[in-house]
Amino acid sequence: MSKAVQKTRPTGSQMRVRIVLGLALAAVAGALILDASGRAPRGAGSDHAASALFAANVPGGEIVCQPDAFLSDDAARVQIQIGTFGRPVPDLRVTFVDLAGTPVASGALPAGGREGLVTIPIKRTRRAPASTTACLHIGGSSPVELAGEAGPIIPGSEVVGGRQQPGRVSLTYFRAGEESWSSLLPELTRRFGLGKAAFFGDWTLPVAVLMLLGVWVAAARLLSGELT
């Protein structure tokens, strides 16, 4: 009996390998938990124009308007990249209106910030329609540059000082506050099942995670056997 027990008892090298593998798996799990608990602003869409270059030159005191701003219903902030030629950012006022000219949201940012990405909080007055126009009023008397995409004059082009200009300004929207991956887990689970065969659903992501965990455990056991 004692000999049988002696044969099944792990050796010192086996114990060291198991400890190292256990620590490695614990480190991976800890990193995943830490990453999932981190909080950051969550996007709420955009006007589909990238910040590829400075696409609009707007004199101080003028207004740049852009059709098809695509303001989402959960947007609470709008982000714009602005160049001021080294000067402080002037005061900015943004208004979103529907086809009838009725405001659906507005916001303001006081002067004094640095050029670059600026975020303007917006306050909603009503639900945003599918077609929304964004108008940004530039304070002060000095011109600014707004980032976006170049292009020909089309119905969706920007309008500066009442005159249509080529290109589009990039508008990026964010939800209120900050959210973590763990708080978004129900929505991630729902979306993971979309775009697949009809029998896939909300259960797809949990099953995939369990299968991945099973692969990790099997790989660890196999590696432990090979190293000892």
Image: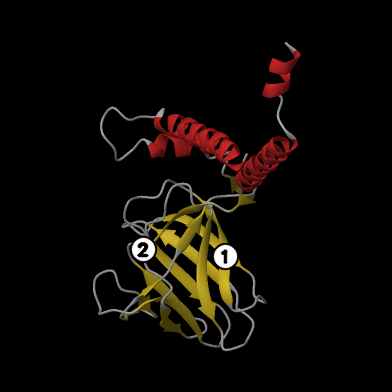
Residue at the spot 61% in from the left edge and 88% down from the top edge: 86
Tell me which label, 2 or 1, sits earlier in the chain.
2
Q: Position of residue 109 (x, y in %)?
A: 61, 67
Residue at the spot 33% in from the left edge and 77% down from the top edge: 167
Q: Nearer the viewer, residue 220 or 120?
A: 220
Amino acid at pointer 2: His
Q: In the structure shown, which secondary structural element does the residue marked by tag 2 occupy?
A: loop
Residue 139 seen in render: yes
Q: Position of residue 227 (x, y in %)?
A: 60, 42
- Residue located beneath label 1 in the image: 119
- The quadrant of the rendering that contains the N terminus is top right
Q: Position of 11 compared to 25: left or right? A: right
Amino acid at pointer 1: Thr
Q: CA distance from mark 2 to mark 1?
A: 17 Å
Report the mark closest to the observer, 2 or 1: 2
- The quadrant of the rendering that contains the C terminus is top right
Q: Is residue 80 above or below residue 151?
A: above
Residue at the spot 64% in from the left edge and 78% down from the top edge: 114
Q: In the structure shown, which secondary structural element does the residue marked by tag 1 occupy?
A: strand
Q: Nearer the viewer, residue 123 or 31?
A: 31
- Residue located beneath label 2 in the image: 48
